[in-house]
Amino acid sequence: MKNNLPLPQEKKLTVLFRLEPGCLGPKGEELIDKFCQLAQKEFESLHSDFVQWDIVPRNDKSLPEMQYQINSKKLSQDKAAKFLHIFNKDLGEFENQVHKKLAAFIDQYLGH
């Protein structure tokens, strides 16, 4: 499959990442929309051959922080792990990488 990269949009794994306003500190509610737009641009190049990003505020706490989809169809964690395995990526390592990148971007955004 690697020789068919990049994948067409409808075959890419969409990572829906919902960010808590609180991750931006006490003014998070005011900052979260703009931050998500900037984070969207920051993440666009990360695994862009087979992943597309949808970074939004997490306004509904009942929804998961991360959700995986292909062509608007939700995937279980297991199916997302199988998809990532095709590209020699482990789901746990992938999520850790995403969280580390996000933490660094939050620090940069907040000027730390």
Image: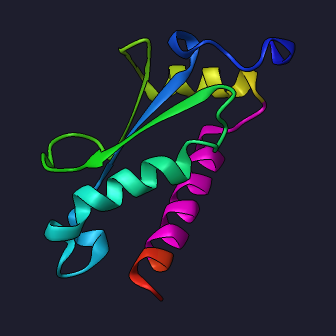
Q: Is 95 contained in the magenta span?
A: yes
Pick whichever, 94 or 106, lies toward us.
106
Answer above or below: position of 20 versus 71: below
Q: Residue furthest right?
A: 3
Q: Position of residue 93 (x, y in %)?
A: 65, 49
Q: Residue at x 72, y 20 (%)?
A: 6
Q: Is residue 39 above or below residue 106?
A: above
How many numbered discs? 0
The one nearer the camera, 6 or 20, is: 6
* Position in image of residue 18 (x %, y %): 30, 47
Q: Which residues are magenta?
A: 88-106
Query: Image quadrant of residue 33?
Result: bottom left
Q: Nearer the viewer, residue 56 or 64?
A: 56
The N terminus: image quadrant:
top right
Residue 109 percent location from the top left of the image: 43, 75
Image location of residue 3, percent across then percent down? 87, 14
Left/right placement of residue 59 relative to residue 90 reads: left
Q: Tell whether position 45 is magenta.
A: no
Based on the displayed image, in which of its 4 quarters is residue 86 positioned? top right
- The prevailing secondary structure element of the residues shown in magenta is helix
Q: Residue at x 83, y 18 (%)?
A: 2
Q: Residue at x 30, y 70 (%)?
A: 23
In the picture provided, is 66 more to the left or to the right than 48?
Answer: left
